[in-house]
Every structure is written in C-alpha cells, then in structure tokens.
Image (cartoon, helix red, strand yellow):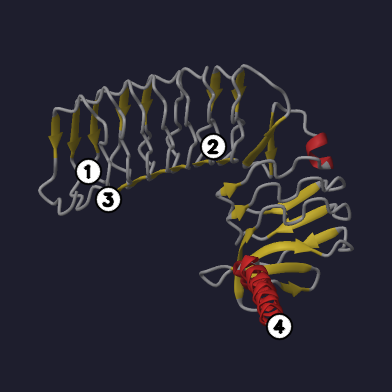
Amino acid sequence: MQKKIWKRLFSVITAIEIVIGFVLSVPCHVNAQTVQVQMENNSYEEIYYTINTVGNAVISGALETCSSTLEIPSSIEGRLVTEIEAEAFAGNTNIQKIVVPDSVTRIGDRAFADCSNLQMLEGAAGIVSVGTDIMNGTAWLQNQTDNVAVLLQRTAVALTKQCEQYAVPDGVEVLSDGLFDGNTTLTGLDLPDSLKYIGKNCLRDCVNLKEIVFPAHLQQIQNGAFQGCIGLQEIIFPTKLSAIGDQAFSQCSGIERITFRDSLRTIGNNAFAKCTGLRTVTLPSSLIQIGTGVFSKCTSLCAVTFQSPIEEISSNAFESCSMLETLILPDSLLKI
C-alpha cells in the first residue's frame, strides 16, 4: 500500500516538473516582442509605419493591394516621416511609382527589391543614407544602361556591369551601402566633386584598389566603408569631412600615411585598427571624439600627436601598438 502511494506521488511530481519545464523553456521575450510589434505597428491609408525611439515615423510597408502610385506623406498624425525600413515594400508587384518626401533621410536594405513593376521614384531630396540592393529586381533597374545606376540623379544604388574602373557620375551625393563591397576586380574609382556621403561597407574588401581621391565636399564616411582595402597606401582626407565611422579603414594593412583635416570631429570604434603599415599619426585640432580601439593592433605605429583639446581617449585606443614610442597628449585630457 505504501509503495503504491509513493508511486502515485512520484508520478504527480514528475508531471508537475514536466509542465514547469515546458513553461520555462518557452522564451519570455517572444511574448514581449509580439506585444511590442502589435503596439508599434500602425496603419495610415495604404501605408504601415512604426514609431522610432525619438518619436518619428518609420515606413514599414504597404497593403499588397495598394495603388500603383504610392505617395508617402512627410508626416503622419503629427510625426515626421524620416525613414523607410529594410524590405518595407519588397516584393510588392502592384507598385509602379513611389513618391518619397524630402523628410526621409534613410532608405533601408532592399526597401523596394523585387517590386518588379516599379519604374519610377520621385522626391527623396533629403536622403543621406541608402541601404544595399534597394532597387534590385525592379523595372527601373532593368532599364539602366550606365555602369553605375543612379537614382534621382543623386544616389548611386547599383552596378550594372563588372568593371575594373568606374567613374561615378557628376551630381551624385550618396554612395549606397555595399555598392562595391567585395569587388576584387576594382582597381580605380573616380568620385565626383558633388559626393557627400559614402555608405556602410561601400568598398569593403576591394583588395586591388590602390588609390582613392576624396572630393572636397565629402562629409561622412560610414562604418566599414574601406575595411580590408589592403592595396591603399596613402589617405588624404578632404577639408569638409566631419565623421569617420566604425571600422571604416580597419585591416587596411597597406596604409602608411594618413592626412587628417581640421574639419574632422569624430572617429568611430576601431576605425584604423590593424592598419599594420601605419607609422605616424597627427590628429587634428577639431577632433572631439575618438572611439574605442581606434588604432589598436597598428603594430608599426611609433608616434601619435593630439592637437585637439580632447578630454577623453576611449579604451584600447592603442592596444597592441608594440612599436609606439611617442605619444603627445593634450593638456585638456581628463581620462584615458
């Protein structure tokens, strides 16, 4: 009798453990994420949108049965529309024309990809950042004949042919993310005077690119733009450049000389990490922020001079710089 009772008790305990184990194995973040998506997804006429952390509207999609001409408003219920998220309209075959307001500054990866009937975009004069492959699989891209496909006469978004040398047309202000990424046949690139923004990973691992001449109006070089371009030997930055992104020139082992200008204000994390050929650096007086690991593992670096009244140098800035002998720091420095 006592054995039967213990068997029953054991069975009950086992069943409870199984139930508890099942409940605990279900990831709590799934429910939280679902609730969050339900809370953030909104609709306005034919368009879906979310609200970002600063309170602006981000376009996330449209009805599959939307009109052939889709006009995105510059504001929705008092919120400024500033971005079209990745794959927002991807695969929508109804759309033939999209009007993008000038308030939009960023178009995400593959935002219009595989919209096979999309022939035209209008507006978008405020764009400063464009994701990868935004027009792939569209009627518009199929109709492009130049080596570099330019959207709205100011944004280079695709390559139509594989070439050793490219000349980006005059008037282009933005190079899209990943435009030349991994192009090992590229040996030369002419950039127009109009260029202001170079996108993320734009020329990453273009290992046979030997030289780059930056135009005078260039303002931003984004994350990973020239990462792994081992053929580059000298970099002369232009006088209006204000920001260099994370890992922008990391692993460019051939770079020996860099000339910075007094317009530069920020250098991102690991921006020049593993530039093993770099020997001396003089940082400009305009610099106000320097990222972590910015010159880490630059094993030939022997001298660094700060000319700016910077107050903090982030961690690991010169990690594993085994040849570093001279480091001239500003009097303003409070933390290193």
Q: Are marks 4 and 2 in contact (CB under 8 Å)?
A: no
In the rendering, at what x and y percent does residue 228 appear?
A: 47, 27
Mark 1 lies on residue: 285
In the rendering, at what x and y percent does residue 127 appear?
A: 59, 52
Q: What whole-number distance in Å separates the C-alpha atoms at marks 1 and 4? A: 89 Å
Q: Are marks 1 and 2 in contact (CB under 8 Å)?
A: no
In the rendering, at what x and y percent does residue 17 appear?
A: 64, 72
Mark 3 lies on residue: 288
Please report whichever mark, 4 or 2, sits nearer to the chain's N-terminal start.
4
Q: Is residue 134 left or right of residue 255?
A: right
| Count of numbered labels shown in the rendering | 4
Residue at disc 3, secondary structure = loop
Q: Nearer the viewer, mark 4 or mark 3?
A: 4
Q: Is residue 223 above or below residue 4?
A: above
Residue at disc 1, secondary structure = loop
Label 4 Cα crowd, 10 Å radius (few <14 / some 14-19 / many 20+): few
Of the residues shown, which amino acid type is indicated by label 4? Met
Q: What whole-number distance in Å separates the C-alpha atoms at marks 4 and 3? A: 81 Å
Rendered residue at 68%/35% (across/down): 158
The circle drawn on residue 1 is: 4
Rendered residue at 45%/21% (across/down): 230
